[in-house]
Image (spheres, helix red, strand yellow):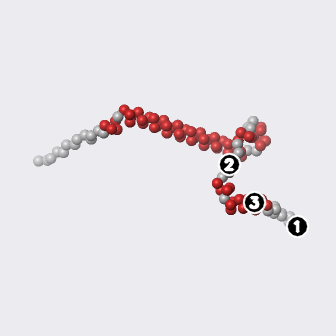
Amino acid sequence: MQAHQTYQARPTYAAYETPERQAAIPTVFNWLKRKLDARRSRLNHARNIEYLRSLDRHTLEDIGVDIASLGEVRPTLASSNPYVVASTVIGRSLPPPVTNSR
């Protein structure tokens, strides 16, 4: 004789099926979507400004971009490093190399 096993259905967890939890899922999803959209917008704005800063002043004037609207270039953390500051100062104070081939 062969024994048959009977399987019972999994018990449902009533705590996970409450209307409050079901209503919270779209709220969290919408909040996360807004955060990602805002981050994407900030990154695109920063990329556009970086691109415009790389252009020549005359080109910016030709296309009608106000140079003051691009804002200041924020100093990076590396620029406050004393070794970077010293090498920048020394590099700027050296005379240009002599290229006379006489």
Circle 3 or circle 1, nearest the eye: 3
- Of mark 1 and mark 2, the one earlier in the sequence is 2
Quarter residue 60 falls in: top right
Q: Is residue 26 above or below residue 100?
A: above
Residue 12 placement: quadrant: top left
Query: Where residue 27 sits: x, y (%)?
Result: 45, 35
Mark 3 → mark 1, Cα distance in angstroms: 31 Å
Measure the C-alpha gap from mark 3 to mark 2.
19 Å
Tell me the residue at 27%/40% (across/down). 11
The residue that mark 2 highlights is 74
Q: Which residue is mark 1?
A: 102
Q: Secondary structure at mark 3?
A: helix
Point 79% across, 62% down: residue: 94
SS category of the residue bearing label 1:
loop
**Where's the C terminus, which quadrant?**
bottom right
> In this rendering, would 54 be left or right of 3?
right
Residue denoted by label 3: 89
- Secondary structure beneath label 2: loop
Q: Amino acid at mark 1?
A: Arg
**Residue 8: where, in percent of width, then height?**
22, 41
Precedes in sequence: disc 3 or disc 1: 3
Give the x, y percent position of residue 26.
44, 34
Q: Is residue 35 above or below residue 82?
A: above
User: Label 1, label 2: how many angstroms apart (C-alpha)?
Assistant: 45 Å
Q: Residue furthest left?
A: 1
